[in-house]
């Protein structure tokens, strides 16, 4: 089965702790909400300690046009996306030797926080020596589910082309979507939660001679995936696109939806693969927020300890949309996980949708 060999992450230069973010929100929103102090508890209750942004906080205190924000997105996405690719292919933690750019057959580019045509991976290919016939698959609009979806599509590509080496690059600059004049509670909650993050994964087919360059004794092979769309749920999460850019849509019902919907979805997926939840050793979950992690535990009736890594990533980096699951996966891949262990990857996104991956360390 196609195997994830290397994962690299990049954090933008401006680190903001949660107290700083809370003071920023108090300054922006205090005249709009009579109960601002009660609402600001979200910054403390979310258990996020710090996050990283591509701009400092002062940049967000002045009105920016959609053009200004999107120009900043393109510039930072190219710079930091390039860095993530270089780190992934020259990764001493996971590789015994560097992987040449010329060996990459396809790049899946994942993002939901900015627009670019030509797309970001095309711009990066002008800076790094990829072969000109490298296939490009930019995927937009999948939000927090996008990283898991990118891995699923890379898995399918490597099934079709077992000699292939494929990159999945995720660039999410959520901060650049901030709307200073959006006085909705969704925007306030988003301000407490979302962050910027960039990650890249190398997925390789069975006939790509992975043992010639793999450093770890075992790596996660993807053995099955499942995409699910919930009907009539378009208003659960996403963007409203207006003249000033992207306005966050974030339903307060998301934890309840997860509790009621996720377990039947997961159980069906595992049953099709002749497994049950009790057989899963590792839970590789996109940490959408503390309430989302709690909903995972309650819905699936799993040990709280199975979400420790997801919670730690949330604590140190916030919700980086599609990139976050790569940060979680990387921490699992750094461990010495025994041969045959099973992992369940999961992420939820706009649609409302779910992406599941079944992995076995081989």
Image (tube, rainbow, N blue to C red):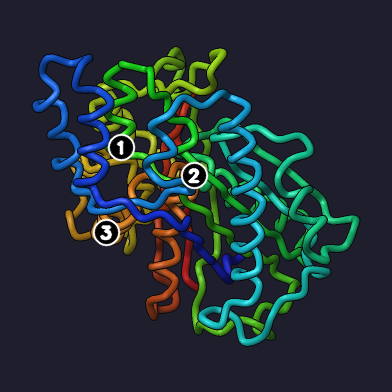
Q: Are marks 2 and 3 in contact (CB under 8 Å)?
A: no
The local secondary structure at tag 2 comes to: helix
| Residue 145 location (% of width, % of height) | 48, 39
Q: Circle 2 is placed at which residue position? A: 322
Left or right of residue 220: residue 258: left
Percent across and percent down for residue 225 are 53, 47
Q: How many marks?
A: 3
Residue at position x 44%, y 12% in the image: 232
Q: Callout 3: few (<14), some (14-19), or many (20+) C-alpha neighbours within 10 Å?
A: some
Give the camera-side residue of 298 and 128. 128
- 108, above or below 291, in the image: below
Residue 116: percent from left, percent from top: 70, 35
The residue labelled by disc 1 is: 263
The CA span between labels 2 and 3 is 17 Å
Q: Which residue is mark 3?
A: 312
- Classify mark 1: helix, strand or loop: helix
Q: Residue furthest right?
A: 132
């Amino acid at each position: 089965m196609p195997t994830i060999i290397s994962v690299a992450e990049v954090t933008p230069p401006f680190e903001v702790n949660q107290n700083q973010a809370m003071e920023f929100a108090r300054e922006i929103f205090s005249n709009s909400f009579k109960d601002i102090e009660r609402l600001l508890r979200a910054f403390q209750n979310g258990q996020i300690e710090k996050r990283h942004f591509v701009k400092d906080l002062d940049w967000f205190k002045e009105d920016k046009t959609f053009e200004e924000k999107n120009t900043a997105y393109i510039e930072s996405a190219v710079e930091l996306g390039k860095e993530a690719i270089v780190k992934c292919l020259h990764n001493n933690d996971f590789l015994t030797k560097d992987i040449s750019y010329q060996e990459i057959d396809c790049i899946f580019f994942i993002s939901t926080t900015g627009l670019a045509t030509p797309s970001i991976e095309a711009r990066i290919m002008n800076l790094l020596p990829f072969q000109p016939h490298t296939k490009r698959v930019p995927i937009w609009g999948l939000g927090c589910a996008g990283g898991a979806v990118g891995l699923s599509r890379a898995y399918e590509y490597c099934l079709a082309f077992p000699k292939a080496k494929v990159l999945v690059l995720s660039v999410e600059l959520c901060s650049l979507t901030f709307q200073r004049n959006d006085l909705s509670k969704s925007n306030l909650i988003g301000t407490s939660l979302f962050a910027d993050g960039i990650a890249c994964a190398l997925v390789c087919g069975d006939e790509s001679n992975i043992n010639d360059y793999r450093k770890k004794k075992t790596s996660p092979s993807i053995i099955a995936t499942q995409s699910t769309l919930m009907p009539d749920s378009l208003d659960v999460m996403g963007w409203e696109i207006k003249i000033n850019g992207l306005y966050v849509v974030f339903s307060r019902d998301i934890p309840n939806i997860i509790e009621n919907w996720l377990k039947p979805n997961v159980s069906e997926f595992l049953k099709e693969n002749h497994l049950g939840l009790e057989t899963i050793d590792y839970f590789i979950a996109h940490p959408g927020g503390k309430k989302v992690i709690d909903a995972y535990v309650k819905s699936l009736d799993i040990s709280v300890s199975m979400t420790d890594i997801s919670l730690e990533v949330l604590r140190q980096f916030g919700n980086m949309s599609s990139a976050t699951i790569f940060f979680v996966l990387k921490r699992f891949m750094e461990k010495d996980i025994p041969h045959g262990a099973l992992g369940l990857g999961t992420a939820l996104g706009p649609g409302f949708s779910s992406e599941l991956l079944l992995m076995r360390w081989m």
